[in-house]
Image: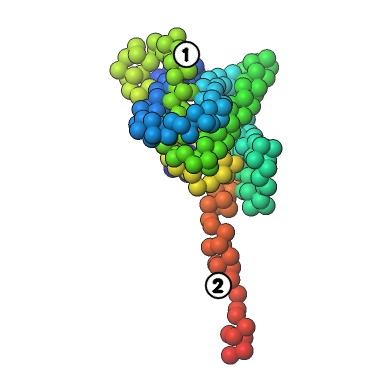
Amino acid sequence: MLAASVLWGTTGTAATFAPAAGPLAIGAVAMGLGGLLQALTAAGPIVRERAALRAQRRVVALGAAAVAVYPLAFYTSMRLAGVAVGTVVSIGSAPLASALAERLIDRHRLTGRWLAGAALGLAGIVLLGLADATRPGAARAGAGPAVLGVALGLAAGAAYALYSWAAHRLIGRGLTSRAAMGAVFGLGGLSLLPVLLATGAPLVASWHAAAVGAYLALVPMFGGYLLFGWALAHVPASTATTLSLLEPAVATVLAVLVVGERLPASGWSGLALIVACLVILTVPAARTRRVWEDRQVSPGTIAG
């Protein structure tokens, strides 16, 4: 999951190399072509497990619809409300939406460990977003577009949570991760093709722009969501979406190192909180207990 988040964190920097492409084109090429590649490479498992997929067709359809909505809402949110606000609202709201879905639909109980990690991660995301919003030269939209951008960011976060929940639900009901992800993302990618045909002209205007589109589809989306599917086979959707808080942290570091942006102290503090969140959620509880117990003095030692 962390490896997937690192790949997703490169999308913003990569998109700067194709400035003529709009947010709909970027979202459609990334998730559209990436989703179709997921389906093509998972054709065998999808065919073998078609009966199980038909039995879960409502979950597949819900996940596919969320896949189609997410990139369009996410990239448009960043364009309207600014990168900072769009990213904070979209990525920051996804873990809460995921946890809500698991609580209401699956009746899962939220653990104190998840709540502590999510609180630290969300605080880090807010600090990171505020640092980006206040840096010199940051883009600012008017009140109307900003409000619409925030609304689209919430829609993106809900969509991310929904397709994460749908894929995890399918895997939990016996489907392999390849069949579940291939079906959900393949149908979602198919729905994005009309948007790509309508808006994607700037991506084929030059070899340079085409290379950016190919990278977005192949590496962060196809490769990243392949890793994402494997992760969902082992952790709940709420944990997976919380771990994806690493994405904006990676994007920020790349903006500093590659694009040349500067990050104030509050931004580095936000990165530190995100790292703390990831440590809490990824270090196994048993290992944490062992480390603590190893530091205690045993009764036998005291007696000796």
Q: Answer few, some or many: residues within 10 Å of disc 1's Cα (few below 14, many 20 plus, some between 14 and 19).
A: some
Instruction: Give the mark toward the camera: 2 or 1.
Output: 1
Q: Quadrant of the C terminus?
A: bottom right
- The image quarter containing residue 126 is top right
Q: Is residue 257 left or right of residue 62?
A: left
Q: Amino acid at mark 2?
A: Asp
- Label 1: which secondary element: helix
Q: Which residue is mark 1?
A: 195
In primary-sequence order, the first of circles 2 and 1 is 1
Q: Is residue 227 left or right of residue 126?
A: left
Q: Which residue is mark 2?
A: 294
Q: Amino acid at mark 1?
A: Val
User: For this rendering, which residue is in front, 130 or 53?
Assistant: 53
Depicted 23 relative to depicted 35: above or below: above
- The image quarter containing residue 84 is top right
Does residue 219 show up? no
* Residue 93 place in picture, x, y as percent: 63, 33
Mark 2 to mark 1: distance in Å?
57 Å
Depicted 277 relative to depicted 301: above or below: above
* Residue 177 place in picture, x, y as percent: 45, 39
* Residue 67 place in picture, x, y as percent: 52, 26
Depicted 226 relative to depicted 138: above or below: below
Q: Residue at x 49, y 42 (%)?
A: 174
Q: Answer few, some or many: residues within 10 Å of disc 2's Cα (few below 14, many 20 plus, some between 14 and 19).
A: few
Q: Residue at x 53, y 46 (%)?
A: 235
User: For this rendering, which residue is in front, 229 or 151?
Assistant: 229
